[in-house]
Structures are given as structure tokens and as C-alpha cells.
Image (cartoon, rainbow, N blue to C red):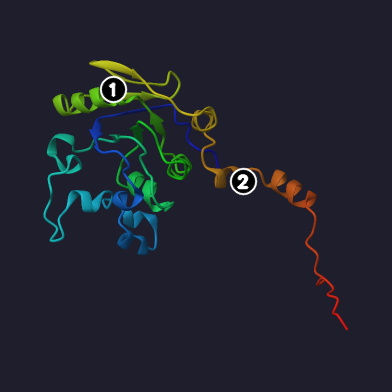
Amino acid sequence: MPLEKITTICARIIPVPGANMDTDRIIPARFLKCITFDELAGKMFYDERFNADGTPKGHPLDSPHHAGAAIIIGGENFGCGSSREHAPQAIRRSGIRAVVAESFAEIFFGNACGIGLPCVRASAADLEKLTQLAEEKPDEEWKLDLVSMTISSSVGSFPVDMPTEPRDAFLQGKWDAVVELMNSPEKVQQLASSLPLPSLTSPSHSHAG
């Protein structure tokens, strides 16, 4: 079962401002009771977007100007907080295809890359420019290129960064570890056979007389 190679993502960009965007803000805890991740579609940043009575707060994600945008422009330490895998799942299931931020929490980054959601870093200055351009030209199509490591459009080009291992996994179509295991049953069996079996006998205990 081969995976899709992810080399470029072409989409409009949308700013989701603020440093330390933690996973509870990305997907509030009350939504974690879902049976499948599909139920998280449309729930990302819910409390950032809506009041308690369900009325909208005017978040960029709900602006008609940004409707259909699929690349988030974030801030520093994106995805911090708890390690809930529901956070990147909510983002991906809501139609977002990539996140560009100044930095990412390590666990969020790993969970996101493992479901085919590239997370790339850009400088604070370039993110500020991208946010400004997203507001000035919301219909502009951008290309996030994991080969050249740039995000570009007709109005500008900015360098982005990503660690080598996850970048190679996207370029080679090997970003899902579960699929990789399923595609290599012989290697799994070989490794399993090389591991020592656990002892089934209980350790003896000496008792003082």
C-alpha cells in the first residue's frame, strides 16, 4: 500500500496568530470523546472561533476572505501543551494541508508529520510578511515546496526549514510509520525473531529464617 509522495502543496494561506498555540486551544478537551478522528472536522480552534453560545468571534478561519485556505501561518511554539494526537488530526480533518510557523512543539510536530501534515519553520519576520500578504491578498495562491524548501507566490518567496528525516519521508512517500510496518512484514518478522523471549519463570526469593 504505497503512500502519496508530498513534494508541493498549492493553496491559499490563512493566519492563525499568536505564540504558544497549545493543543487545548487547537482542539478543546470536550471534543476528545469522539469515536473516530473524522468527527473532529470543523472543530479546530473551536473556542478561539466561537463564544459559549455558538456565535462567531470573527476569527480569520471564519472570514469569507479566507474560505478554503489550506496552509496555516502560525507563530512560535505551535502545538505546545498536552500530547493529544487529536490536535493535528483536527487540523488535517478540517482541510488544512500544511502549517508554517516559527517553531513547533516536538510531539505535535511528530504527530502531524505522521498523518501527512507537513510542518515547516520560517523566521518571525517572514511570518509577519506572510500574514500581511494573507490579509492584503487573500485570494493569492501559494506553493509550499518541500524540494526547494520555499513558500512562494507571484508576490514573493520565503525560505522555510524542516529537519532532514521528516522531509525525506514526505518526499519519498514514507511518512506513515504504520503503513511502513505493514509494507515490510518480512523485516518485522526478522526483527521479532531476533529479540530474546521474556522469561516465564518467577524469580526466586530467599527468606530469612
* Residue 125 - label: 1
Q: Is residue 162 above or below residue 2?
A: above
Could you say which quadrant of the image residue 7 lies in? top left
Residue 25 x %, y %: 29, 50
Who comes first in sequence, dot 1 or dot 2? 1
Please give left or right for residue 88 compared with residue 65 in the image: right
Residue 34 x %, y %: 36, 62
Residue 24 x %, y %: 32, 53
Q: Residue at x 19, y 25 (%)?
A: 132
Q: Residue at x 44, y 51 (%)?
A: 83
For mark 2, give the secondary structure.
helix
Q: Nearer the viewer, residue 171 or 163?
A: 163
Please give left or right for residue 130 compared with residue 88 in the image: left
For mark 1, give the secondary structure.
helix
Q: Residue at x 26, y 49 (%)?
A: 45
Three-letter residue code for mark 2: Leu
Q: Which residue is mark 2?
A: 181
Distance between mark 1 and mark 2 Cα atoms: 40 Å
Mark 2: few, some, or many residues within 10 Å (few <14, many ≥20)? few
Three-letter residue code for mark 1: Ala
* Residue 71 - label: none
Please give left or right for residue 78 compared with residue 16 in the image: right
